[in-house]
Amino acid sequence: MTCPICAGTEAREIPCSRRYTAGWPIHVCTGCRLVHVREHCSADAIARVWSEELFADSPDPKSVLYQATLPAVLARLTYVAATLDQSVGLKDRAVIDIGAGTVAFLDLAAARGGRTFGIEPSAANCARLRAQGHSCHEGTVESYAAGGGADLVTILWTLECTSDPRAMLAAAHRVLADGGRLCVATGSRILVPFKKPLDYYLGEGNPDIHPFHWSAATLAAVLAVAGFRMTWTNSYIVSDVLCVIAAKGEADWTGDHPDAALAFFDRWDRESPMYQ
Ligand SMILES: [Zn+2]
């Protein structure tokens, strides 16, 4: 695949990947240093995994990692909701959450006065959304054809899971009103102090459902090429979360230092014990 940021086709394999990901390589783009699984599956296939396996009515036990009943998940979503309420305001704002998951963020936004709408491929999650009083589109963001007008679009722990971040951000750009704000939060942040062993970060088996690993620089870059300029970034060095707020507009981008991602994973591989 071509790189979604710089459209480059050259990449180098992260040297530690085979040890943790059962031979499924992770690459760093030689053009902009984006770290990603180059040979990943389609948007529909990723949506199917999330809908039928991770968010099913009788889910795989591993999927509880993504359910907002887990205090750590509720905590990180509360952090984003409180941040947005204090910085841009949620009361009477039209909020679209792309990849609404198990509804928790939209509940938090509605509790702060937001007018909420979820885009979510899981039928079970859409039933939860409707039961909680939220409007929704059942499907991928690529299949959502409605026009703009949102005051706030949120992509929370989702940009790393999509097959095509440019398409997701293009959709966010389309549905966001001029003067509105986009918020992206991710836990797949890199080029920061190690907070956990590498095998915890990469998980078991197929890394395909989290194809993208964003640094602050590559996140700024993909936002810039999608027509957004960042207006705020959290203290991601000391947090498990990389969270940014952006507005429509032009911005320059540089990507990371040429060897930064390779050196980062090499150090992480050598310095962290393996627990699997
Ligand atoms: Zn690139």
Image (cartoon, grey):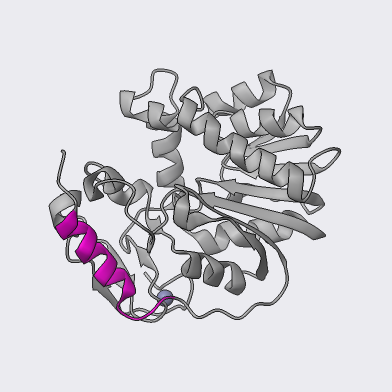
Q: Main secondary structure of the magenta part?
A: helix
Rendering coords of residue 150 (x, y %): 78, 49
Give the percent coordinates (x, y) of residue 34. 40, 69
Residue 160 picture location, percent across and down: 45, 53
Quadrant the N terminus occupies: bottom left
Residue toward you, 180 or 197? 197
| Residue 154 belongs to magenta span | no
> Which region shows up in magenta?
256-271
Task: Give left or right: position of 264 versus 3.
Answer: left
148 lies left or right of 213:
right
Looking at the rendering, which quadrant does residue 256 occupy?
Answer: bottom left
- Residue reaching furthest to the right: 92
The residue located at (17%, 66%) in the rendering is 15
Q: In this view, does 4 lie above or below 236?
A: below
Give whichever of 147, 179 is nearer the camera: 179
Q: Where is residue 159 in the image (x, y as percent from the top left)?
A: 50, 53
The residue at 32%/74% (across/down) is 260
Question: Is residue 102 positioned above or below 161 on the image?
Answer: above
Count of picture labels: 0
Question: The C terminus appears in which quarter of the rendering?
Answer: top left
In which image quadrant can residue 205 be found? top left
Residue 262 lies within the magenta run: yes
- Left/right placement of residue 201 relative to residue 122 reads left
